[in-house]
């Protein structure tokens, strides 16, 4: 149980285009989803927290207009990188938490974004 | 406020030797503590978690960790390293809804 999927697993796009990444909880209802960014050989940096049906809460320094997060249902959250530039290239990982999980988050497999 | 310090960004051990990865935490509330493993280009897999029950926590793949409040530590151990243990390991603390990760420790296994 507690499986989280991400799609796509990797994506290459041209500078200036927008890219959407999906995060789904497959076998549980995720009241809260989190989006992280990971640079090579570094730790995970929390970008934002989203609760179903509410606006996402962004961490300091994360541009909300650039990284659009939607959490439309208890099983789906999306991250859209708008007008992507090469510096947005990174590994993006989502996680999801159910109602009774002792603050445990279940992580997706990640999405590798490369912006040319 | 919460934080995690992982001592040693790189640890190398021989196959069959003891694995010890160090983690110290800081939290203003009673913490939940986690160890995750990450293989290249993959997400995080939970190894084990401390949720205020037993202080010695057993996880998957033979790993275990002991919560020591007096030392604010949650070190990860495995009695005998396998080649498949080579990966990046992250300690994390949660006192509120957010997880705060350490900087990670890359474990290398020497044949």
Image (cartoon, coloured by chain):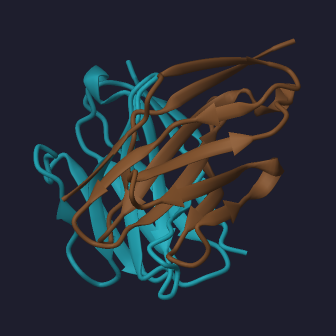
Which image quarter is the N terminus of chain B in?
Answer: bottom left
Q: Residue B72 placed where, x, y %?
A: 38, 53
Quarter assignment of residue A51: bottom left
Residue at image position (82%, 49%) is B61
Q: Residue B89 placed where, x, y %?
A: 58, 37
Q: Nearer the viewer, residue A114 or B41?
A: B41
Q: Is residue A8 among what the camera can see? A: no
Q: Residue A39 placed where, x, y %?
A: 39, 28
Residue at image position (40%, 68%) is A33
Q: Nearer the viewer, residue B53 or A29?
A: B53
Residue found at the far top of this picture? B111
Q: Colour of chain B?
A: brown
Q: Colour of chain A?
A: cyan
Q: Is residue A76 among what the camera can see? A: yes
Which image quarter is the C terminus of chain B in?
Answer: top right
Q: Nearer the viewer, residue A77 or B75?
A: B75
Quarter assignment of residue A40: top left
In-image side of A49 versus A61 (left or right): right
Q: Residue A43 placed where, x, y %?
A: 41, 35
Q: Compared to B108, does A43 lie above or below?
A: below
Q: Nearer the viewer, residue A43 or B28?
A: B28
């Amino acid at each position: 149980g507690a499986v989280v999927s991400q799609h796509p697993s990797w994506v290459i796009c041209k500078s200036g285009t927008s890219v959407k990444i999906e995060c789904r909880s497959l076998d549980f209802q995720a009241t809260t989803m989190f989006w992280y960014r990971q640079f090579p050989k570094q730790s995970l940096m929390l970008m934002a927290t989203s609760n179903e049906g509410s606006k996402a809460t962004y961490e300091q320094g994360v541009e909300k207009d650039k990284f659009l997060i939607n959490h439309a249902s208890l099983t789906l959250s999306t991250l859209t990188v708008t007008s992507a530039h090469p510096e947005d290239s990174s590994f993006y990982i989502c996680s999801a938490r159910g109602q009774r999980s002792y603050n445990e988050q279940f992580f997706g497999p990640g999405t590798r974004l490369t912006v040319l | 406020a919460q934080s995690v310090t992982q001592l040693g960004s790189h640890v190398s051990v021989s196959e069959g030797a003891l694995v010890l990865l160090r983690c110290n935490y800081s939290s203003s509330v009673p913490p939940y503590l986690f160890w995750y493993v990450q293989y290249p280009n993959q997400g995080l897999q939970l190894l084990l978690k401390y949720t205020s029950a037993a202080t010695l926590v057993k996880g998957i793949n033979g790993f275990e960790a002991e919560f020591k409040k007096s030392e604010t530590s949650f070190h990860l151990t495995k009695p005998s390293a396998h080649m498949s243990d080579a990966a990046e390991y992250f300690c994390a603390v949660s006192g509120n809804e957010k997880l705060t990760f350490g900087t990670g420790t890359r474990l290398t296994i020497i044949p």
